[in-house]
Amino acid sequence: MLPIDIHAAQNIALAAEAQRDFELQAVYAELKSRDPSGGRFAAVLRNTIDQLLNGEVTGRYAWESLYKTERTHAGTLVEINLQREFNFADGNVMDYLIADIEVDCKYSQTFGGWMIPPEAVGHLCLLVWADDSASRWSAGLFRVQGEWLNRGSNRDAKLTVKAAHRDKIYWLWRDAQLPQNVLLHMDPVDRAAVFASPSGQERVNELFRRVQKRCISRNVVRTVAQQKDYMKRVRGNGGARSSLKPEGILIMGAYDSHRAIASKLGLPTPGEGEFVSVRVVRAEARHATRSHVELDGVMWAIADESDPPEPGPQLPAHTR
């Protein structure tokens, strides 16, 4: 039996129709079993957008900066990257075989803009949408029926779902949180300060100075550094960790010891390929209400604007 997980916009009639569609039930159950939270799916979309932006080479961080040909290529990359992540078998007539059922995959950066080929009529489509500016995404299953489609005027006769029939989409995940594009959503003044220096190292230093208490992905560092050895720009021995230590700024990565420090300080714990920075000061009585952590035998508290900078402690050795 298909688990009932229906977005508020879907009505009882749609649920009943989906229950009668045994192929839809099987594909739904298979996808939900592989990714109950949608986290893997969201990560594929985040990584695909970043792949298109190619920040290491271009320094770009906004979808609008892509060329038209690159935006057109997005659907193909989403299709490929989902197949790699979930190891879907190739379909015989559609893109994938999921639970031994033919499924086509269609992505659009505009909600409702999915372009469906005539040969998909009668088949299931996995419809995917993501908006980097809103940090939202959706994915649902749609049984393609001719009367639910707009007739296309383009040369390859592709069709779109009529607005009145978008309620026939059976949502796997609806309006879910897309991992945020930190550079896109930064304060413009801070972003300009990050990119002001011609030095990749100085740009990375400014990134961790300006963006604190938030997880920063490896791809953001890559885009800011615009260097092949971008990870070196984060580490000690000349990287941001050693450069910012005199200011009391700690940069924690995806290590157990670092995650424990972030947790004690009430910060987001960095996931794989992520970092979080924060400025600390030696804890005094006036810091009693702030989160604390012991490092180098001293208690440290998160600093605020009233605390003058002071050299920070040494982070513990990297352990997982």
Image (cartoon, helix red, strand yellow):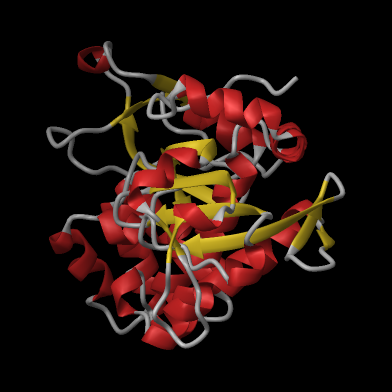
Q: Which corner quadrant of the image does residue 167 belong to? A: top left
* Left or right placement of residue 152 versus residue 172 in this view: left
Comparing 1 with 59, the one in front is 1
* Left or right placement of residue 29 versus residue 10 in this view: right
Residue at 65% x, 41% y is: 255
Q: Determine if residue 313 is in view.
A: no
Image location of residue 320, percent across then percent down: 73, 38
Residue at 55% x, 48% y is: 42
Q: Which corner quadrant of the image does residue 315 belong to? A: top right
In the rendered view, would you say 250 is above or below 291?
Answer: below
In the rendered view, would you say 273 is above or below 118?
Answer: above
* Left or right placement of residue 89 versus residue 136 in this view: right
Image location of residue 225, percent across then percent down: 43, 74
Residue at 51% x, 42% y is: 314
Q: Which corner quadrant of the image does residue 187 belong to? A: bottom left
* Count of marks placed on residues: 0
Comparing 127 with 116, the one in front is 116
In the rendered view, would you say 251 is above or below 172?
Answer: below
Image location of residue 202, percent across then percent down: 34, 72
Comparing 52 with 270, the one in front is 52
Q: Determine if residue 171 is in view.
A: yes
Comparing 236 with 173, the one in front is 173
Residue at 12% x, 33% y is: 306
* Left or right placement of residue 4 versus residue 174 in this view: right
In the rendered view, would you say 143 is above or below 316?
Answer: below
Q: Residue furthest front?
A: 147
Image location of residue 235, percent across then percent down: 55, 60
Q: Quadrant location of the N terminus? A: top right
